[in-house]
Amino acid sequence: MTDNQSLSKIIIACKRGSHDGFSQIVELYASRLYGYFYRLTGNVDVSNDLLSELFVRLVEKIGAYGGGSFDLWLFKIATNIFYDHLRYEQRRKKLIQSHKQRLEEGLGGGKESDGEAIDMLQIQLDQLDEQTRELLILRYYSDLSFKEIAQMRKEPMGTVLSKVHRGLAKLRELMEQKYEERK
Amino acid sequence: MKKENNENLQELLAKFLDAREASKAVEDIFAGEHVFNSNPAPEPAPALLKDIKQRMAVAAAGRNGLWTRHFVWQLATAAAAIVVVVWAGMAFLQKSGETGQFNQAQAREAFWQEASDDNIDSKIAQLDQKESGTPIITFETNAGSETMAVSDVTDELDEIGNSFWEG
């Protein structure tokens, strides 16, 4: 994994508009960011669009990056892009319907629909409340510290710790129940 | 791939929980994260990443051009503003001088146009008064217009007043 010094050099190159710099950023962060969007939306096509939008926005905003945690800065942009996407009422309804459909299909055994690969984790994540789900996904894919997450969400750190702890415990319980049912 | 975020969970949780609860919470958190590790999300397609890099290159080229155009535009606007201010200032100063001179010439011409054989003496007196600063009055009489100093007029009026009651 790239150390801080190497990352700083890459960021400086990006600020100068270097194509190589931007390519390296994509290589470093695409996997985590894609995972983040996929777990939030459960949809490959939407995740592709959001990932593209994120990196184009990064090009536009890199000049405004003034130091501090680059990961925090990047995942803030990612979160904003996700919420922008949610704001379209029609898409939101489709997302809820899609989650519901996946849940119903998952409870019945799970199958692919509309080109989506439905995995057990996605089904169980959909059973959690929206806030907890988003928090767990952010925590895992951003790999931000609890302090950074608390700062980003403007919540006390104790609250974030508690929510993550309870959320992960619940998720684990749901997954274990599912595995038991399948035996 | 995950990086180390240099976080000591045990220490962090110990601020909110007792030691035993903190240890249990750390175990729960790691176990929960293991669920994510065991069920990885799909990776982005190589074609998608290639497309993204191309879009970024286009956006970067546009951003650099935009910055240059923005800078040049700002510079041009500032220069134009300076030119306008200087021109306006010069035009204003020039016009003030000319207007002052023009008004004086106009006034003099109008003054002498009004002058005739009948009122020439009063006109001269007015000019004298302007130069000396003595207040005067110009009034019409049966004999024509007459100009007198205010002090002379008040003296005459006093005389008239004193002699009026003599009957």
Image (tube, coloured by chain):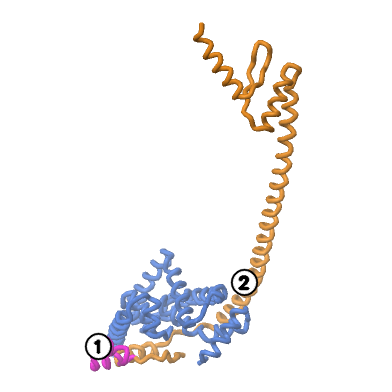
Chain colours: A blue, B orange
Mark closer to the chain start, 1 or 2: 1
Report if residue B59 is visible in the image: yes
- Where is residue B39? Give x, y as percent: 39, 88
Query: In terms of depth relative to the viewer, which is nearer, A69 or A129?
Result: A69
In this view, the residue in front, B81 or A22, is B81
Residue holding disc 2 = B63
In terms of depth relative to the viewer, which is nearer, B33 or A109? B33
Residue A14 location, quadrant: bottom right
The residue type indicated by label 2 comes to: Arg
Drawn side of residue B83 relative to residue B46, left or right:
right
- What secondary structure characterizes most of the magenta part? helix
Residue at 55% across / 84% down in the picture?
Answer: A25
Q: Position of residue B44 (x, y in %)?
A: 51, 83
Q: Which mark is residue B30?
A: none
Q: In the rendered structure, the residue with mark 2 lies on which chain? A: B
Give the extent of the magenta segment: B9-26
Name the kind of residue labelled 1 in the image: Leu
The reply to whether label 1 and label 2 mark residues of one chain is yes
Query: Which x, y percent locates residue B134?
Result: 63, 30
